């Protein structure tokens, strides 16, 4: 158990790196966007998340935490945009 924890701690995507803390902070976008609905902001966040999903996939080592965060944000944004579109008629 301690060996696995030590390996994670010292890994290239562990908590000593931005590969860990960047995605953790980005989860705030997902939570904040659950609470609001806006056409321009939602569209911008869709583009932003799509770009960063590609970045998370292409960067070495692959950043699965960032990919999951932006995939979740993309889902939330598309849902919020669909709600906004329905409200517009």
Image (spheres, rainbow, N blue to C red):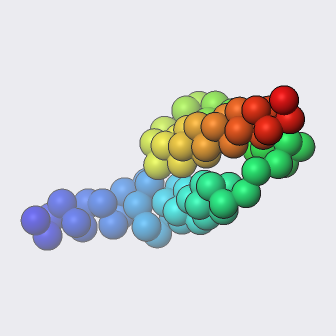
Please give the name of the residue rendered at 49% of the width and 43% of the height, measured from the top-left corner.
68
Q: Is residue 6 left or right of residue 81?
A: left
Q: Could you tell me residue 70's position as x and y percent?
A: 59, 43
Q: Nearer the viewer, residue 13 or 47?
A: 47
Q: Residue 30: x percent and y percent? A: 60, 54
Residue 45 in sight from this viewpoint: yes
Q: Residue furthest right?
A: 40
Question: Is 22 located above or below residue 77 in the figure?
Answer: below
Q: Is residue 16 above or below residue 14?
A: below
Residue 69 at x, y percent in the picture: 54, 48
Task: Report the quarter where the N terminus lies.
Answer: bottom left
User: Camera-side residue: 41 or 18?
Assistant: 41
Occupied quadrant, residue 64: top left
Residue drawn at point x = 26 percent, y = 60 percent:
7
Which is nearer the eye, 87 or 23?
87
How many marks are shown on the rendered structure?
A: 0
Left or right side of 32 for 21: left
Residue 51 rendering spot, x and y as whole percentages? 72, 35
């Amino acid at each position: 158990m301690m060996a696995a924890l030590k390996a994670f701690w010292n890994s290239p995507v562990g908590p000593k790196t931005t590969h860990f803390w960047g995605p953790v902070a980005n989860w705030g976008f997902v939570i904040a966007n659950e609470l609001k609905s806006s056409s321009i902001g939602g569209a911008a966040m869709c583009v932003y998340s799509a770009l960063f999903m590609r970045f998370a996939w292409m960067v070495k080592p692959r950043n699965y935490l960032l990919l999951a965060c932006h995939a979740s944000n993309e889902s939330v944004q598309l849902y919020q945009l669909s709600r906004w579109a329905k409200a517009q008629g």
